Image: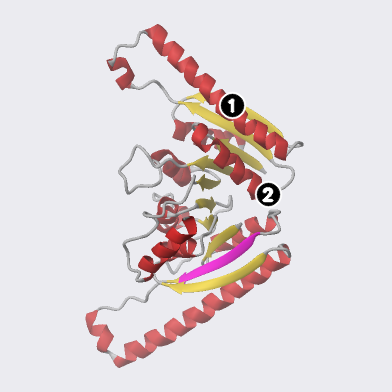
Amino acid sequence: MKILVAVDDMSFADALSDFIIHCELSKNSEFRIMHVVEPVFAADFAVGFSAEQRESLKEERHRLGRCVVMHIDTQLQLKFPQASISEIVVDGFAKTAIIENAASWGADLIVMGSHGRGSVERLFLGSVSLSVLAQAPCSVAIVRLHKLPSKAKLADDDESTATSDVQHAQFRS
Amino acid sequence: MKILIALDDSPYSKDVLEDVARRAWPDNAQFKLLTVIEPFCMSGDDEEDADLIEASGVVHRKRWQIADKLCEQAMKKLTAALPHATVDFEIKEGSARSQIINTAVEWSADRIIMGVHGQAVCPHNLLGSVSQGVAMHAPCSVEIVRSKVRHKVPSKV
């Protein structure tokens, strides 16, 4: 089984490796840990970065990316000493890079975190995870850092929502 | 570790079960199989028609039987494949999306595993509305199992 682990920053590194370790996937799993360095945005140009500064910013992002990737790598190696684990840090846009890489490598599962940021508040799932979820050629696991007690309800049709919310708050407290 | 598996009677759910059964889960894994029976829509005047009420009652009972059978078969399959795991099932009524999320919250699930219809039923809509809704609002990690086999859309749809 080929598992592509797409990691953003350190905040998800432990959650991702925990998820995979508890997944107890088949013994001959193959892992690829991936970090995507997104292009320096237009807003960065506006504050007047020189080409040199942009280059060093990019290098810094690559370095941070490699740190996160290696962090997960170490944890997976401890748990699966026999597994083949590779790491890549690439330039590009996260969602296309993840989908393309999963397709070209023939991944069976993509594991990624979800920040749910950079979008309106009610949208808990980030745009990257949502696009990957929709367009991936394989199974996708979205890992959450912690439960969201106050938000973990739907305003829909259920009378049970109110009670379940209280129960949920107790579970977390 | 609590794992909620949302099932329906589609071939995608069978793929999900097979995928789950193939893995080696920890001994303390607890599985809950969930099937949601969505409401039978009736409009204003229909609700006073005795024949329709009776017919809808028949349909409703039949759906419960089918859901019961589906869950029992799935439970047997999973218990056979994972003898150490605890498996039980639950059938709920309401909208699939909110019932899956509510069950995950009530049971404090660690993970939701479900299949995805989207691409087959509605090609431009790559992710089904239920899986998308659950992925967006779930309180825990969500795994969407997408089999590499494309199933045919039933002709009655």
Magenta extent: B29-36
Whole-angstrom CA distance, mark 1 to mark 2, is: 23 Å
- Where is B141 relative to A65, above or below? below
- Where is A94 relative to A45, above or below? below
Q: Which residue is mark 1?
A: A88
Q: Nearer the viewer, residue B11 or A77?
A: A77
Q: Three-letter amino acid code at disc 2?
A: Glu
Q: Residues within 10 Å of mark 2 (few under 14, many from 20)?
A: few
- The answer to whether residue A106 is left or right of residue A54 is right
In the image, what residue occupies the spot 58% across and 52% down? Answer: B147
Residue A1 seen in render:
yes
Q: Which mark is residue A24?
A: 2
- The answer to whether residue B111 is left or right of residue A121 is right
Upstream in the sequence, badge 1 or badge 2? Answer: 2
Q: Nearer the viewer, residue A72 or A150?
A: A150
- The answer to whether residue A46 is left or right of residue B120 is left
Q: Nearer the viewer, residue A109 or B135?
A: B135
Mark closer to the observer (1, 2): 2
